[in-house]
Amino acid sequence: PEAVLQEAQKHLLNFNGTGMSVMELSHRSKEYEEVHAGAQQQLRKLLTISEEYEVLLLQGGASLQFSMIPLNLLKEGKIGYYVLTGSWSEKALKEAKKVGSTAIIASSKEEQYRSIPSLKTEPLDEDGAYLHITSNNTIYGTEWKSYPSSSIPLIADMSSDILSKRINVEQFGLIYAGAQKNLGPSGVTVVIMKKDLITTPDDHLPTMLSYETYSKNQSLYNTPPTFSIYLLKLVLDWVEHEGGIEALEKRNQEKAKILYDVIDESDRFYSGHAIPDSRSNMNVTFTLPSEEKTKEFLNLAEEKGFVGLNGHRSVGGCRASIYNAVPVDHVVQLAEFMKWFKARS
Ligand SMILES: *Cc1c(COP(=O)(O)O)cnc(C)c1O
């Protein structure tokens, strides 16, 4: 959010009267520790996270969690269950396969990941280590509307929709998110994890890959990404100031509806990639009647100041990412542009 950037700019050279930038402070200093614990506390407050859970601040992005989750939780004789809903879940599964036994319990791959599949069966308690889902599929533009119930720990990659709507943390064993979409700058990864899932690892697991290391040391075992965590704290304070998750959820629904209405009322000039009941409120994906039209659309959009509307390099088409920080007004302007472009075509 622009307000966060301005706040950071204001204190860039002199944080809290220290005469230094946050990035110059020792990560063992009282001033930094306040920022660090403050970010964890604010996240607990916004998401109503109970004391049964740890809030860990890690590095390596969501991508490292694809490996850390099986390394810590996928024990010999157990199965990691995965729901395939797009490229990120495929990548998560690929890493888990290197560690132990896995199974795909549902997938929408056959239909180009246009929907969230329903689980035909539930993974079994006696052999299941966890059930892994991707709550929002950034590339395909689909999002879970309600989460599967499961007797084994439910794990969700929430990188692209954390803090965009209310969730009940108690439904999950572990939630993780790279910060760079809804939480702050890249460099920090949030893991919210049930304490009873944190166990002493086997001797062969490197220290930095064990959740226990972070949990035992308040995520200060080594130097954390201090400036990213400072900005995370500012973003979380901004969320509270905006009225909390409830207010953002309403705003996000409003933003997404504006764009989906343009798509639905365009006589198929724009076609949404996701089927309506699986549509994401964070990433609106659509195509135009031809490659040439898509190119023309993207070029003209860029001229008008709309950047990053091209779809992910793996799927093409168009994608409007309307994360928490995107104001309603920007979405209204994009909708106007889309209508104008259709009319002139
Ligand atoms: C962006 C994204 C990732 C990748 O995150 P990194 O922090 O770059 O590793 C993983 N999963 C989802 C759902 C994403 O949107």
Image (cartoon, rainbow, N blue to C red):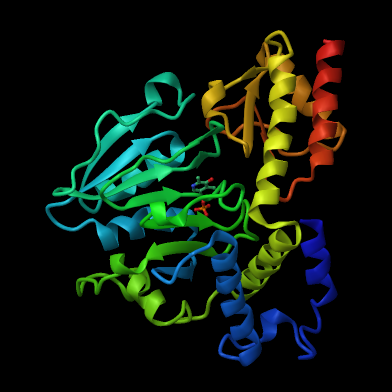
Q: How many tags in the picture?
A: 0
Q: Say if 77 sits above or below 17 in the image.
A: above
In the rendered image, residue 72, in percent from the top left (x then y), is placed at: 28, 63
Comparing 75 with 248, the one in front is 248
Look at 63% across and 53% down and name the residue there.
182
**Residue 47, image x and y in percent?**
55, 60
Residue 312: quadrant of the picture = top right
Q: Residue at x 63, y 39 (%)?
A: 282
Q: In which quarter of the image is the N terminus?
A: bottom right
Residue 162 spot, x, y in % from top left: 56, 51
- Measuring 49% from the left and 66% from the top, which residue is drawn there? 59
Foreground: 154 or 325? 154
Residue 63 in sight from this viewpoint: yes
Q: In this view, does 201 lie to the left or right of 76?
A: right
Residue 221 found in image quarter: bottom left
- Residue 274 in view here: no
Give residue 329's position: percent from left, percent from top: 84, 40
Left or right placement of residue 106 versus residue 141 in this view: left
Q: In this view, does 337 lie to the left or right of 184?
A: right
Quadrant for residue 40, please give it. bottom right
Residue closest to the eye, 299 or 85 = 85
Say which quadrant the C terminus sits in: top right
Q: In this view, does 62 lie above or below 290?
A: below
